[in-house]
Amino acid sequence: MIHFELFLAFFIPNIIGYGGGPAIIPLIEAEVVGRYGWMSGQEFAEILALGNALPSPIATKMAGYVGYEVAGLGGALIAVFATVVPSLLLMLGALGLLYRHRESPRVKRMSQWVRPVIAMMMAWLVASFFMEGVNGAGLAHTLLIAAAAAIALLRFSTHPAIVVLGALLYGAVMLG
């Protein structure tokens, strides 16, 4: 029964939540803390803080951790699966529909409008990350990390994972 409850606790917020991880975290908290009582609000907040410090989508990290705490490895797998399935089903359905009508002038026009919207969303994300960096580490550290990352990526074609690891190490040594 616990596995089914884990599935529902993560499937429902992900199927009805719109806006990605930050939008569904309160829904997940309502299930995990409020409905099932698997952890306290303080524990959930600590897990959320830790999850925000790590790369990758927050919802899958939260699902994996909570699932593991509640029901071990099987619980983690079920919770992550329940988190990913709604997006996967919606994406497969949308891709099938777009592929079926790929020659349609309307679909072609729509795809021309999507690119600038995605570019603006990415610009907003970069700006918000920059502001978080300035608020957390200060302007000098943020600019130094940004400049070093830009040089490593653009000039030396360093793999992004190595750049992220370098920034994390800098933060641990200089800001920790």
Image: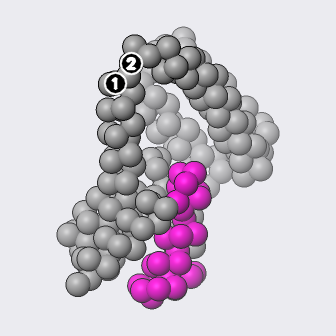
Amino acid carrying label 2: it is: Arg
Q: For numbered disc 2, what is the local secondary structure?
A: loop
The relative height of residue 112 versus residue 136 in the rendered view (above or below) is above
Asked whether the beta carbons under mark 2 and mark 1 sit within 8 Å of each other, the answer is: yes
Judge whether residue 109 can be spotted in this image: yes
The relative height of residue 131 versus residue 82 in the rendered view (above or below) is above
**Residue 82 image-quadrant placement:** bottom left
Residue 102 tag number: 2
Q: For numbered disc 1, what is the local secondary structure?
A: helix
Amino acid carrying label 1: it is: Tyr
Position in image of residue 115 (x %, y %): 58, 22
Q: Which sits in the foreground, 19 or 60?
A: 19
Left or right relative to 4: residue 11 = right
**Residue 72 image-quadrant placement:** bottom left
Pick the quarter of the image with the N terminus.
bottom left
Position in image of residue 24 (x %, y %): 54, 62
Q: Which sits in the foreground, 135 or 23?
A: 23
Position in image of residue 141 (x %, y %): 72, 39
Instruction: Based on the picture, tell me whether residue 40 belongs to the magenta stretch.
Output: yes
Which residues fall within the magenta stretch? 17-42
Left or right relative to 139: residue 119 = left
Pick the quarter of the image with the C terminus.
bottom right
Residue found 39% across the figure and 37% down from its top: 94
CA distance separating discs 2 and 1: 5 Å
Judge whether residue 137 can be spotted in this image: no
Of helix, strand and loop, which mostly describes the magenta segment?
Answer: helix
Residue linked to disc 1: 99
Badge 1 local density, few (<14 within 10 Å), some, or many (20+)?
A: few
